[in-house]
Amino acid sequence: MSATVVLVVIGLYLGIVLVAGILAGLRREYSVVEYVAASRQLNLFVMYFLMGASIFSAFAFLGGPGWAYSRGAASFYILAYCAMGLLPWWIWGPRAYRLGHKFGYVTQAELVADRFQSKGLSALMAVVSILAFIQYIALQLKGIGYVVNVTTGGYVPFWAGALLAYVVVLIYVFMGGVRGVAWTNVIQGIFMLALAWSLGLYLPYRFHGGVAAMFEKIAEAKPLHLVVGEPQISWAAFSTAILVSVLGFSMWPHLFMKAYTTESERTLKQSIMLYPTFAIFMIPVLFIGFSGIGVVPPEELQAADQILPTMLMKIGLSPLGLGIVAAGTLAAAMSSADAITHAAASVYTIDFHRQVINPKLTDRQAVIITRIAVVLFCGVAYYIAIFGAQTLVALLLGAYGSIVQFLPLVAATFFWPRANKWGAIAGLVAGVLTNYYFQLVVPTPFQIHPGIWGLLVNIVVMVVVTYLTPPPDLKHARKFVEESLTPVD
């Protein structure tokens, strides 16, 4: 009976989100600029939740508490990069907005590939983006599967829980495009904020008598849990996890693309300034994980990521309450899954298919192919979520290691006219391969994040190859520097 109530609540929530996502895209122009960039019309209210909710995901309610529970103070890296993550976007965002309006860009690679006059670079960026996106979507689906499985007492298997939300996201992204993503993120963002503060304050009170009492107990029983360093994490791993996250934050194509959806540069800057108020909700999220220390024995968990739903089962929360919490966690996961799925499909169509397969692609054909890509990439991510063994934090940090390799390309676009396509391509390839080599083949030296090693190699190779090969069309390259500084009328 309890599993039925939980499923009914989840079903109602999914139904509301599905309807909102579909309605947002109805009676809209059938074009790429509408489907991908909402005809550049999104206001501050929508942008606030679109940027905030699409960034916070299953990682927030599951991976974050999981790290607080298992690694203690190491989880503070999340607060650090949340506080600083959008600072670089103050540099890149307005410049991307201006160039997007002047030259019609709707994706990150369109801008970079035009600057370097290279279709090959566009295709390469698309491949790197999609590989990272699939990891990120898998993170969301894995989180959804955990929550539904545990809150229904195992009645709904992991694979079925992930499939349920996957289908809903698939439908409204397919139908509504970025408007569907935006308006569902408004609903999901409000829901997850309310849930985060409610649980983050209630669980420490319920198990420990309050937040202060909770940390006093941890300090007495497990003092090293409140200290950054060994045995939980080395300082090198901790600091470079922050660094790769901050530098990679604004390089995510789905975030970068939001510069093209906003109605004005003022709205974009206001969104950046307001973002930290959304990120504050990570504080109570970490309280959730800390409150499980001394309450849930590690042997009761298949993975630390399951700490939140496991604790909810321990307090005897009513089926209605479990359903609401499950729906809120789904909100966090789906608000990222939809934005990333939409971006992955858009990147494939515009940056790969149009550049490599069919340069004469019409607007109508592009929208159709984008929708097909939505189905394909979601399916691959679902497979990885079900059969992959990585934790949510590992999936997230692994994806950041690839995406941060776009940083030298974007910086060169806005600030270094001498950089040429050969240096850009060579640097990107070298950086991505280095990241994956240390991520998948051999342990990373000195416990420094693989993405940082990749970034260092990327920059060196880009500079060396650039100066060993002929310069680009400097008049063309300088146009991107000059036009990015000129406000749009």
Image: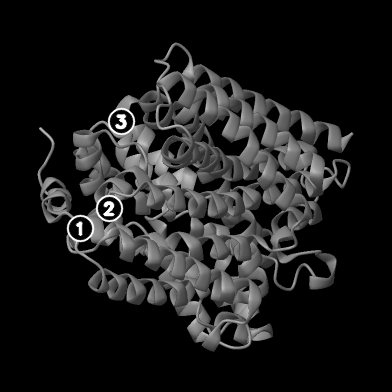
Query: What residue is at 78 percent from the left and 33 percent from the top?
Result: 7
Q: Quadrant of the C terminus?
A: top left
Name the residue that disc number 2 marks.
116
User: Mark 3 or mark 1, which has the lower sequence index?
Assistant: 3
How far apart, in angstroms, are the residues tagged by discs 2 and 3? 32 Å
Kindly report which numbered mark, 3 or 1, lies closer to the viewer in this rendering. 1
Is 134 on the left-hand or right-hand side of 320? left
Q: Three-letter amino acid code at disc 3? A: Asn
Image position of 116 with respect to 208: above or below: above
Image position of 274 with respect to 418: above or below: above
Is 422 on the left-hand or right-hand side of 128? left
Contact, mark 1 vs mark 2 (Cβ under 8 Å): yes
Looking at this view, is 488 or 300 the one in front?
Answer: 488
Q: Residue 11 shows which numbered tag?
A: none
Name the residue that disc number 3 marks.
43
Q: Three-letter amino acid code at disc 2? A: Phe
